[in-house]
Amino acid sequence: MSKKTKEKDLQDIENKDIKADNIDTAATENAESETTTDEELPIEEQDETAKLTAEIDDLKAQIDKQKDDYLRLMAEFDNYRRRTMREKADLIKTGGESCMKAILPVIDDFERAMQAVKNSNDVDALKEGVSLIYNKFLAYLDQNGVKEMETIGAEFDADKHEAIAQIPAPAPEQKGKIIDCTQKGYTLNDVVIRFPKVVVAQ
């Protein structure tokens, strides 16, 4: 191999090394230019980043507040549930107390009437006394929303009456109406608590 050829080969190798160094240098510079800090960002992008960060912090605060409100509400509801269950149990246990206390005077009247029956021969006075007790008891029921249902002469209604018998109608206008009642019915605040037993004309 001649001297010129060797020199040419050495020069080609040096040129290749220089090109490779130039490529590495350019790649490094590009990478450095791509990894810029916030301080090197344009002002518009810095403002947008700060705005987004503030929004994230605000949303986190809202979530924390809602979580706290939810926990408080759950605790309040649990307390309310326990309190209402306790009140309901007390009501079931003692709810009839006022009702029973109001009936006691009627029982007292009956006891006095029974005592009078033993010592009195005045039948009219006894009848009057029992009638007074009966009216007193009816007044008590009325005060507490218990009312007697009107039946005789009324149209039969299967939702309100219990038919125990059917008989031929004495007159055409009485057909489908109640002509007799064997047991009275009562409502409590307009709700039937005992259905009357009636005889219906057909």
Image: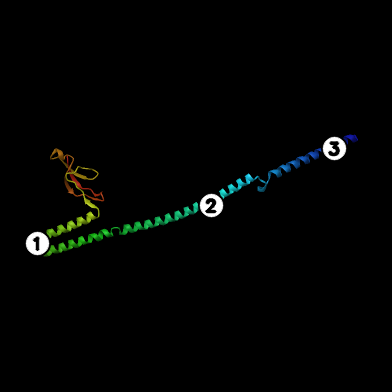
> Is label 2 in contact with label 1 (beta carbons under 8 Å)?
no
Q: Amino acid at mark 1?
A: Asp
* Residue 179 point in image, percent of width and height: 16, 44
Q: Residues within 10 Å of mark 2 (few under 14, many from 20)?
A: few
Of mark 2 and mark 1, the one earlier in the sequence is 2
Packing grade of label 3 (10 A; few <14, some 14-19, many >=20) is few
Q: Is 88 situated above or below 195? A: below
Identify which residue is drawn at 13% across, 39% down: 171
Give the residue type that dot 2 points to: Ala
What is the quadrant of the N terminus in the image?
top right
Q: Residue at x 61, y 46 (%)?
A: 47
Q: Write the residue at 12% across / 64% down.
A: 118
Q: Which residue is mark 3?
A: 11
Residue 122: numbered disc: 1
- Badge 3 or badge 1: first in the primary sequence: 3
- Determine the image quadrant of residue 90: bottom left
SS at mark 1?
A: loop
> Which secondary structure, mark 3?
helix
Residue 104 position by quadrant: bottom left
How far across and how far down the image is residue 71, in percent?
Answer: 47, 54
The front one of 44 and 66 is 44
